Image (spheres, rainbow, N blue to C red):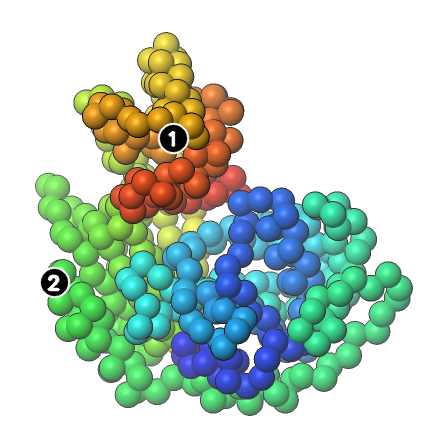
């Protein structure tokens, strides 16, 4: 079992970006340009390493390898994006890896690319890249190749050595559990569970009991062996279930208007652990969008648009408008879920202005975008 934090350290220490790994300060899958560049790098790394894994490390500065981290990213449907745009798509995984010096809401993203052995190419046009394009790594750059190529295996031994140096051990696991419970989450209700005598899952949060059920907010869930974060949310609530083989997370979102608020189930994630040292993640979107009176939503939608125009023009907000602004991401979401198709574009348009106001409203914005992303690829 590979400790992903050690793997990232070994990748950064091994060399600069190469034909089997790339590093990025961040990626943007919310725009066509961002998606296109991400797919280009996936394509190039897959073609350059037909017989071994390739990696993209996200949250690292190019100069000096400084690890600044990125926001937690839990899009389990990212494989759908790759499948939609690439011929002979590789298998990819995105993992959120903990580093002790980073704030609680920051991680390092690790994309692992497992090739098929076949040449990968763009299936269709995206941004300025043409369908049929083939990319290869030329040193640290992903370059287009407009001719027939022969893929060669030149990195297997190097990658194997890096992965072997990153294998987990008992000391790292114990240190991870103690740090999670006694240091990072000493103020929260914390637990751990061992699966198949190999996997250790830790979770912490604020517990709220409703009937016979426990719900957690401010939730952090980690697979300690790999130093990967399975779930993190500063806002939404989850319920947790487990037996000897499975660990299940059901995420809820709190939505409503005026005094009609309710928790709606959003997504179910089930981790199944096996005796052979492997585990499998299965996700299922279970969200049923709430419906509200269209006349009420028209009023809210127009009010949100008026607030956005004030932000653009730097016009001071009245006290009630400041309160409404806190709900702007969620109410734009409700409008979009009720067939106001432009509401999503308005929400994205509001991003730079919400980011400048305060951390709370921007956190709400990011949670809203996360819900939209999950719905899109499902």
- Closer to us: 344 or 122: 344
Residue at screen point 45% across, 84% down: 166
Circle 1 SS class: loop
Residue 59 in the image: state x and y as whole percent. Answer: 46, 65
- Circle number at residue 175: none
- Residue that label 1 marks: 314
- Give the quarter of the image for residue 287: top left
Against 372, residue 218 (above or below) is below
Name the residue located 47 percent from the left edge and 29 percent from the top edge. Answer: 346
Residue 133, placed above or below residue 237:
below
Relative horizontal placement of residue 322, taking residue 362 as reference (left or right): left
Identify the residue at horizontal 45%, vertical 81% (top origin): 9
Most foreground residue, 256 or 313: 313
Looking at the picture, how far across and down is residue 76, in whole percent? 47, 53
- Locate residue 169, reporting x and y percent: 35, 87
SS at badge 2: loop
């Amino acid at each position: 079992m590979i400790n992903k934090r050690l793997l990232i350290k070994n990748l950064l220490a091994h060399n600069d970006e190469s034909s089997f790994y790339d590093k990025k300060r961040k990626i943007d899958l919310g725009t066509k340009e961002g998606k296109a560049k991400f797919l280009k790098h996936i394509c190039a790394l897959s073609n350059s390493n037909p017989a071994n894994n390739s990696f993209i490390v996200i949250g690292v500065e190019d100069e000096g390898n400084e690890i600044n981290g990125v926001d937690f990213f839990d899009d389990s449907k990212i494989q759908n994006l790759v499948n939609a745009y690439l011929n002979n798509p590789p298998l990819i995984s995105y993992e959120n890896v903990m580093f002790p010096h980073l704030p609680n809401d920051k991680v390092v993203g690790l994309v692992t690319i497992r090739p098929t052995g076949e040449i990968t190419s763009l299936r269709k046009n995206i941004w300025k890249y043409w369908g049929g394009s083939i990319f290869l790594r030329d040193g640290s750059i992903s370059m287009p190749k407009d001719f027939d190529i022969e893929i060669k295996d030149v990195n297997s031994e190097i990658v194997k050595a890096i992965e072997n140096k990153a294998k987990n051990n008992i000391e790292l696991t114990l240190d991870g559990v103690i740090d999670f419970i006694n240091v990072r989450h000493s103020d929260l209700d914390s637990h751990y569970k061992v699966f198949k005598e190999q996997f250790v899952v830790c979770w912490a949060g604020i517990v709220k009991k409703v009937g016979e059920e426990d719900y957690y907010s401010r939730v952090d869930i980690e697979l300690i062996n790999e130093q990967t974060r399975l779930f993190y949310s500063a806002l939404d609530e989850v319920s947790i279930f487990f037996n000897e083989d499975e660990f299940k997370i059901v995420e809820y979102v709190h939505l409503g208007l005026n005094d009609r608020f309710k928790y709606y189930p959003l997504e179910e994630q089930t981790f199944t652990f096996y005796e052979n040292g492997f585990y499998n993640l299965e996700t299922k979107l279970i969200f049923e969008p709430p419906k509200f009176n269209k006349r009420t939503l028209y009023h809210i939608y127009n009010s949100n648009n008026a607030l956005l125009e004030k932000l653009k023009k730097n016009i001071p907000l009245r006290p009630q408008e400041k309160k409404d602004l806190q709900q702007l991401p969620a109410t734009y979401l409700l409008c979009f879920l009720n067939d106001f198709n432009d509401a999503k574009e308005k929400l994205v348009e509001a991003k730079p202005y919400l980011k400048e106001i305060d951390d709370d409203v921007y956190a709400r914005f990011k949670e809203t975008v996360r819900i939209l992303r999950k719905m899109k690829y499902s």
